[in-house]
Image: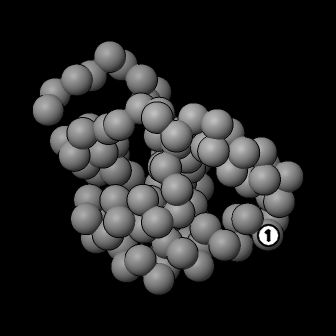
Amino acid sequence: MLQLQVQHLIEKCIVFNMSMEECMEALSKHANIKPVITSTVWKELEKENKDFFDAYAKSRNRNQNGVVWSSSQLHKTFMQLSPSESSSSSYSPSPSYEGDTDD
């Protein structure tokens, strides 16, 4: 079940236009997930969704000066689904863009 929770957090990283390395760092810092776990799940997602990740990489390359998220915004988002919460197969993420700018 941890893999599914990490997958949801990776999806949030993708919404924030993060690289795998940035995601590994953010999940380690804000959700207490070991980077090796994030990396393993990310690579598995890449295998299963090759076309998506190819397009995502191209998009990231075009938008190198993208949105920068504050530490408090990332922490707030990652705490919405932490690995210590009880598991549920009916996870429904809340909207990530609320004009929140608390730095």
Expressed as whole percent of the image width and height from the top left, the position of residue 54 reads: 78, 53
| Number of marks in picture | 1
Quadrant placement of the C terminus:
top left
Expressed as whole percent of the image width and height from the top left, the position of residue 39 reads: 54, 75
**Which residue is farthest right?**
51
In the rendered structure, the answer to whether residue 3 lies left or right of residue 66 reads right
Q: Where is 36 relative to 20, above or below?
A: below
* Amino acid on which disc 1 is placed: Lys
**Which residue is farthest bottom?**
36
Badge 1 marks a residue whose secondary structure is helix
In the rendered structure, the answer to whether residue 65 lies left or right of residue 71 reads right
In the foreground, 47 or 62: 62
Residue marked by disc 1: 47
Residue drawn 35% across the image and 37% down it: 68
Q: Where is 81 relative to 102, above or below?
A: below
Residue drawn 41% across the image and 32% down it: 67
Residue 85 visible to the viewer: no
Q: Where is 69 relative to 100, above or below?
A: below
